Image (spheres, coloured by chain):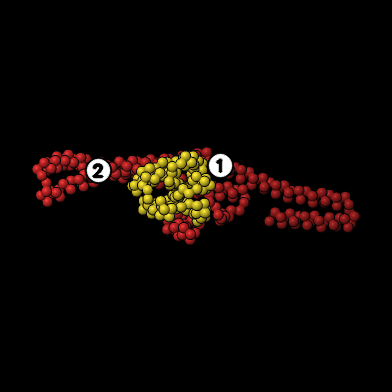
Chain colours: A red, B yellow
Amino acid sequence: MTTDNVLGGEVLELAKSLVEKLETGANEEAHGLLDELTKVRESLLYQEIGKLTRELHNSLSSFHVDTHISDLAEKDIPDARERLRYVVSMTDEAANRTLTAVEGAIPKCEELSDRVSEVQLSWERLLRREMTADEFRALSTKLTEYLPQSSNNVDEIKNGLNEVLMAQGFQDLTGQIIHRVIDLVEDVENNLVGLIKVAGQKTTAPTYESEHADITPTGPAVPGLDDSGRVSGQDEVDDLLSSLGF
Amino acid sequence: MNKEMKILIVDDFSTMRRIIKNLLRDLGFNNTDEADDGSTALPILKKGGYDFLITDWNMPGMPGIELLKAVRADPGLAKLPVLMVTAEQKREQIIEAAEAGVNGYVVKPFTAQVLKEKIDKIFERVGG
């Protein structure tokens, strides 16, 4: 503004004397004044161009200085992709480990249950004094065989349960990795906002278009993030379906 | 309900297939097969002999909703009972599945009890 005022004053003064010279018929001097006026205007233009050039230069160099952006694109994002793949493989492994343990333990439980039922029948006959000496000997043999077998089964079931317990460790590990990826996403977001500012465009809060009749699969809903237009559980699914005549 | 009925489980995650298979076994259904998406499931179904289809929605290749539509469009399969077991829970999706002729809809994560209820309900209706 001050440059404009100074220039304005200078131009005004030149213009005044130009009028004076023209009125008095001093044409040669008037031409000289006109040239001077043009020079003043040109210098204003040069100053503006200079200012723009400087701004452009600063923007470009801040681009180069901030290698963080290129690091994000070249290193961190592929890195995050790998982390997330690892999360998928870790959860896969944990689920399979758990399922294997459960599949191993269930038949052991069934064996135990079958043996107990069998012994219980004989035991009741014994209590009612309906058992012959031969049957009693058979029961004794069975018990001698069953007791260590059952103890063995219980140990195996317990190992299976421990395996299930240990497999849950994936939650801690994947949780940590996912938190790191969330931090990275935040970082990328901030850099993008900075980039938009450098580009000189206004940043406004993002607007999300409502998803009308959009049935594209989106995977599990993340609470607080994907709540709109979604049912919150099986009960709501049942309500919706029964409203449709199911 | 016929415990010998042949069931096809379709899900891209093998862990989920295992979970469903184990739950079905617990309910007395031992005759199960698996497929990992709609495009592998459809030829299996077309070979015939299946009494029940349990499918996920979100799968690479052919998603569950397209499988459902293909099943309903095939004269040989049109009456096959279909249960959708999925994490997709947008209202529009549930309505779309209902309109496409799904017989039941279970959202993940689900319990063994919910799965059993929905299967019982489906076979009560179709009189199996």
> Looking at numbered disc 2 in the image, what kind of residue is underneath it?
Glu
Residue A83 image offset from top left, x and y in percent: 44, 41
Q: How many callouts does the rendering have?
A: 2
A115 sits left or right of A96 in the view = left
Give the labeled residue for mark 2: A111
Q: Residues within 10 Å of mark 2 (few under 14, many from 20)?
A: few
- The furthest residue to the right: A25
Residue A121 image offset from top left, x and y in percent: 18, 48
The disc placed on residue A65 is: 1
User: Residue at position x 76%, y 50% from top?
Assistant: A41
User: Residue at position x 42%, y 51% from top?
Assistant: B108
| Up-down relation of residue A24 to residue A99 (above or below) | below
Q: CA distance from mark 2 to mark 1?
A: 71 Å
> Looking at numbered disc 1 in the image, what kind of residue is underneath it?
Val
| Up-down relation of residue A241 to residue A82 (above or below) | below
Q: Is residue A138 visible?
A: yes
Q: Is residue B13 visible?
A: no
Residue A147 image offset from top left, x and y in percent: 17, 42
| Residue nearer the viewer, A26 or A217 | A217
Lower sequence index among marks 2 and 1 = 1
| Residue nearer the viewer, A6 or A182 | A182
The chain holding disc 2 is: A
User: Residue at position x 12%, y 51% from top?
Assistant: A128
